Structure formats: C-alpha cells, structure tokens
Image (cartoon, rainbow, N blue to C red):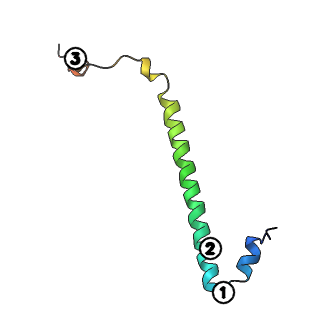
Amino acid sequence: MAVRVSLKDLVKEMPEEMKAQVCDFANYLLEKHLREEDLRWNEFSLREAMRGLEEEPLYTEADLTERWR
C-alpha cells in the first residue's frame, strides 16, 4: 500500500533553497493555468461576438468607392 505524503509535509522538510524553488514552480503553474483560462475565455468571447456574421453579405470593391455628386 502506497503512503501518501502531503505537499505541506514534504516542503516542511526541505532546505530553504528548495522551498523557494517549489514556490517558484507553483507560481509558474498557477500563471500558466490562468493564461490558458484567459485564452479559452478570449476564444469563446470572439466566437460568440462573430456568431451570425457568416450570413451577412460580403462587401465588394464598389462599396469602398467614394461617390461625388
């Protein structure tokens, strides 16, 4: 049977330098998770904003022409 050791107990036994490395790595993992969450939200937001635009007619070059009277 495997013995489960909590992260808190493991870190408690480490020298200060190793604790700093664990803290840096944990911060890295959290920031990575938050960036990925932001990317998913941005993709969702853009997809929802663009929904329904596929049916709109495309503009032509004639639409860009300036008309003078």
Residue most toward the right?
Answer: 1
Q: Look at discs 2 and 3 and give the one toward the viewer.
A: 2
Q: Position of residue 25 (x, y in %)?
A: 58, 70
Mark 3 secondary-structure assignment: helix
Q: Residues within 10 Å of mark 1 (few under 14, many from 20)?
A: few
- What kind of residue is marked 3? Ala
Residue behind mark 1: 15
The secondary element bearing badge 2 is classed as: helix
Q: Position of residue 21 (x, y in %)?
A: 59, 77
Give the distance between the C-alpha atoms of the residues marked 2 and 3, in whole angstroms: 60 Å
Horizontal relation, residue 47 to residue 65: left or right: right
Q: Residue 67 carries which label?
A: none
Q: Do the residues labelled 3 and 1 touch (CB within 8 Å)?
A: no
| Relative height, residue 69 to residue 19 (above, below) | above
Q: Residue at x 47, y 29 (%)?
A: 50
Image mark for residue 62: 3
Q: Is residue 66 left or right of residue 29?
A: left
Mark 1 vs mark 2, CA separation in Å: 13 Å
Where does label 2 land, which residue?
23
Vertical order, 6 against 38 (above or below): below
Quarter of the figure with residue 54:
top left
